[in-house]
Amino acid sequence: MTKSNFPDNFLWGGATAANQFEGAYDVDGKGLSLVDILPDAHHGRWDYLFNAKEAMKMEEDFYPSHESVDFYHHYEEDLRLMAEMGFKTFRMSISWPRIFPQGDEKKPNEKGLQFYDRVIDLCIELGMEPLVTINHFDTPLGMLKKMNGWADRRMIDNYLNFSRVLFMRYKDKVKYWLTFNEINMILHIPLLGGGLDLEGIDNPEQVKYQAAHHQLVASALATKMAHEINPDFQIGCMLAAGVTYPNTPNPKDIFEAMTKDREGYFFIDVQSRGYYPSYSARLFKDMGVSIEMADTDAADLLENTVDFISFSYYSSRLASADPEMTDTTAANVFESLKNPYLKTSEWGWQTDGLGLRTTMNQIYDRYQKPLFVVENGLGAKDIVEDGDKIHDEYRISYLSENIQAMGEAIADGVVCLGYTSWGCIDLISAGSGEMAKRYGYIYVDRDNDGNGTLNRLRKDSFYWYQDVIKTNGVEL
Ligand code: P53
């Protein structure tokens, strides 16, 4: 048999996020989060994303994410299906407003915690290591209204209160934690990433980077708290990653590509090295940004760096310094030119397995800390045939290409703890808010209008991934 590139204890699994997966958006005392006010793409999602005040009126009549695929009431069936595929880990997030409905209460909502007790206990019983994202795009709406989200330094304490409750409660059950999902997203979708309403603000960059500073300090202080509560905890940061290629060998394009990559690396430089990168001084000066810091911030950042680096990877990006180059890929928050060497999906995202290998090598070279690929996958429309068959060979082909490339990166010497593909069960898309953009190995019978039985079906990729895990990545 061919030898596997993957270590024996490699954590194979799948990833989800509470706000896109659980449904039950107002059940058992849950408050509203930022994403709960966003309808789908057919009802102006992208306009609302940059106009929080309008979104808060909640005038659309249907919000697919409110019920989503109802993991809240199907968790048992869903976790058993994941275990059937052989998952070693399950990435989930904990809904902040389920635990603190407004975001700044003193006491947590016990009913919300009891749901996660049930989920985490069953995960462990089924042999799956929970990997928990503390904050995945769902800052409580109350915090946007009260203090413009992370623009306000008081968010650090609110976040730490939330984190403390989780660390104490799951002290002996959860080992792997991520402080913020795609922390660099605050620059691209400030409402989702930072609970920020930037309407009418003179210098949005100032507010975004100040809010980012609060998150970076919150992440460091949560890391400190976590290690005090249980020294075995492994705390990770999370980057929306994807190497940026220069469009041509023109040195201007090379510099542009480097600059684009630094927009994301900026965050990880702070979380992993413990201090602001040297290039940030000039960046801030050029943007007219000046960050207010408390006296203790520099030391807190320096002393509490992350244990590992996790990231999402869907595709590489392509940059040019030439303003005439405008043929960009559709429907993605990162501006990227279309790469003629790559295949493009229905949603305009491009497939680049080798780009994952490059990305992993770059990140590992830069930080020399273990990596964790916590999102990767292909969003596509699936067709159910003969009542219960989904022949999703396009998904298998994307995942196979990417997992092979990840194996090569490991063979290159990169240390990688595991791989959780995105949306292992169909769930609501973050970008489009729809059901139709599916990533799962497990199909859920539910459409964009909320019709469907919510029945779960195994796609062809289900059996394929089961085999990948069983052979530890030899059969791809
Ligand atoms: P969707 C784009 C837009 C929003 C979030 O994306 C994103 C991205 C991709 O870079 O990041 C992650 O659902 C995110 C998930 C999300 C996933 O990408 O728009 O962490 O919440 O579902 C996939 O196809």
Image (tube, rainbow, N blue to C red):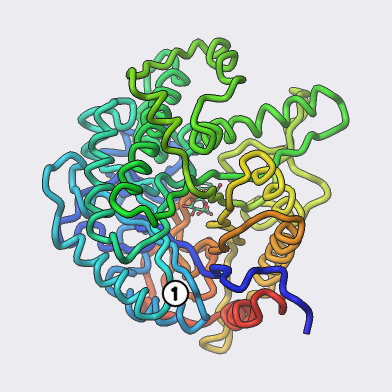
Where 53 sits versus 242, above or below?
above
Figure quadrant of the N terminus: bottom right
366, 247: nearer the viewer = 366
Can see residue 51?
no
Can see residue 418?
yes
Residue at image location 29% in from the left, 25% down from the top: 152
Residue at image location 50% in from the left, 75% down from the top: 87
The residue carrying mark 1 is 444
Count of numbered tags:
1
Mark 1 residue type: Val
Where 200 sits versus 191, above or below?
above
Image position of 264 (left or right of 165): right
Location of residue 122 in the rendering, given as x and y in whole percent from the top left corner? 32, 76
Where 36 sits versus 448, above or below?
above
Q: Residues within 10 Å of mark 1 (few under 14, many from 20)?
A: many
Determine which quarter of the picture holds residue 450.
bottom left
